[in-house]
Image (spheres, rainbow, N blue to C red):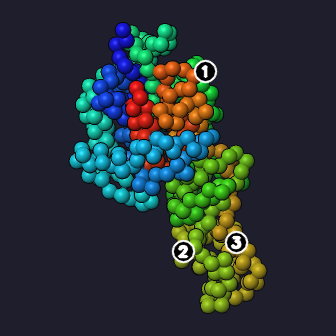
């Protein structure tokens, strides 16, 4: 007779949630992780305060080869459901911009909450556990000396390898015949080629912009770095960007396309450099003015040239030559194919008793708590049927 009803591999957000809920449903659960402590990515998230969900969570804020896959889990376990759990544990929280919810105190409170929920479910937790051979025969999974009729893959993706992240989930999924959508870094800084080195020289300068990649557009801050571009707006569009494609930045969002021509009528003796300096950080204003190469009073500039300058400022094109890779990526796009999983239960369609949840699956959210909400929701969905 199996020792456990379910063995969950990976004690991150999704694994902890799944274990706690299944345990409280009366299941005998073993939660294993190769790290020396649980929830390591939770602890560093949100600057140590854990952006644990987003009140604007909706399926259209997730990327996947199947854009409908996330609907079921997200609809059945909502941001409000997780917030209710947070409040039951007396954890103070606050909303920052764009619906992002953070702990007032520390991310440790979220990990402690999940551990408390696991304790209530009498979950057995093994950390520092090197996961060796995994066998499946006669309806039973064997992980080392432990056995169960259900195995849950919750080991995440390869982003932030210094936290112990690996491609283990994909290797295991392939072994059981599940397809894997090619993983790539997401929510990651972009790098610029040498011919745009003048923008790298603005390292440390940040300003509010609208960044675009393809049809996706995000109004948040962009940050120039010594390697290229970062900041929330850039991290967001990085998930939609592909090598060889440009991104566009509106440095002055909300401006009328004719704003420079109107300024020429109202303030003919001012300069483009001065106008930009009134709206943008000084070093950035100087660089953009130099690039636009329209010196002197704007009274002496043709309307056509001012219109073209305004157009460029509203859609300044960059052609990144790459990203800073998995080392700096907050999450991974791609992963275990949703075509091989049930959206209701997260179970593998053709492998009885096998489940995949969280970042290991080809579902990736926007920046701002969306990926945690997917972890909670997908973990909860699998726990309903373990």
Instruction: Give whichever of 153, 327 is nearer the camera.
Output: 153
Q: Quadrant of the C terminus?
A: top left
Q: Secondary structure at mark 2?
A: helix
Judged by depth in the image, the label closer to the viewer, 3 or 2, is 3
Q: Secondary structure at mark 3?
A: helix
Q: Quadrant of residue 292?
A: bottom right
Q: Which residue is mark 2?
A: 279
Q: Give the Cα separation between the discs numbered 1 and 3.
A: 51 Å
Residue at horizontal 61 percent and vertical 89 percent from the top: 267
Task: Pick whichever of labels 3 and 2 is earlier in the sequence.
Answer: 2
Q: Which residue is mark 1?
A: 177
The answer to whether 162 appears left or right of 122 in the picture is right
Judged by depth in the image, the label closer to the viewer, 1 or 3, is 1
Q: Secondary structure at mark 1?
A: loop
Q: Residues within 10 Å of mark 1 (few under 14, many from 20)?
A: few
Q: Is residue 337 above or below residue 228?
A: above
Q: Which residue is mark 3?
A: 311
Judged by depth in the image, the label closer to the viewer, 1 or 2, is 1
């Amino acid at each position: 007779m199996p020792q456990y009803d379910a063995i969950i591999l990976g004690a991150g957000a999704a694994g902890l949630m799944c274990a706690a809920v299944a345990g409280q449903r009366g299941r005998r659960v073993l939660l294993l992780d190769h790290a020396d402590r649980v929830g390591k990515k939770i602890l560093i998230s949100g600057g140590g305060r854990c952006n644990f969900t987003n009140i604007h969570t909706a399926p259209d804020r997730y990327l996947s080869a199947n854009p409908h896959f996330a609907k079921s889990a997200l609809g059945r376990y909502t941001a409000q459901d997780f917030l209710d759990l947070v409040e039951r544990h007396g954890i103070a929280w606050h909303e920052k911009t764009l619906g992002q919810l953070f702990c007032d105190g520390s991310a440790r409170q979220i990990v402690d909450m999940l551990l408390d929920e696991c304790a209530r479910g009498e979950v057995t937790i093994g950390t520092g556990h090197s996961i060796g051979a995994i066998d499946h025969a006669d309806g039973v999974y064997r992980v080392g000396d432990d056995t169960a009729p259900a195995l849950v893959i919750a080991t995440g993706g390869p982003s932030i390898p210094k936290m112990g992240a690996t491609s283990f989930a994909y290797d295991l999924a392939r072994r059981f015949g599940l397809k894997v959508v090619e993983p790539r870094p997401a929510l990651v800084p972009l790098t610029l080629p040498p011919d745009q080195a003048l923008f790298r020289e603005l390292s440390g300068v940040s300003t509010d912009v609208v960044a675009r990649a393809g049809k996706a557009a995000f109004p948040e801050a962009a940050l120039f770095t010594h390697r290229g571009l970062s900041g929330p707006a850039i991290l967001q569009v990085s998930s939609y960007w592909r090598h060889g494609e440009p991104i566009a930045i509106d440095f002055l969002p909300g401006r009328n396309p004719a704003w420079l021509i109107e300024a020429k009528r109202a303030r003919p003796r001012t300069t483009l450099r001065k106008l930009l300096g009134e709206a943008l950080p000084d070093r950035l204003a100087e660089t953009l003015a130099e690039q636009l190469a329209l010196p002197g009073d704007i009274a002496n500039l043709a309307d056509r040239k001012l219109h073209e300058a305004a157009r460029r400022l509203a859609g300044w094109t960059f052609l990144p030559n790459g990203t800073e890779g998995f080392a700096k990526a907050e999450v991974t796009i791609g992963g275990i194919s949703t075509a091989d999983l049930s959206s209701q239960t997260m179970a593998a369609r053709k492998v009885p008793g096998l489940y995949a949840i969280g970042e290991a699956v080809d579902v990736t959210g926007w920046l701002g708590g969306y990926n945690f909400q997917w972890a909670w929701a997908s973990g909860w969905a699998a726990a309903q049927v373990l």
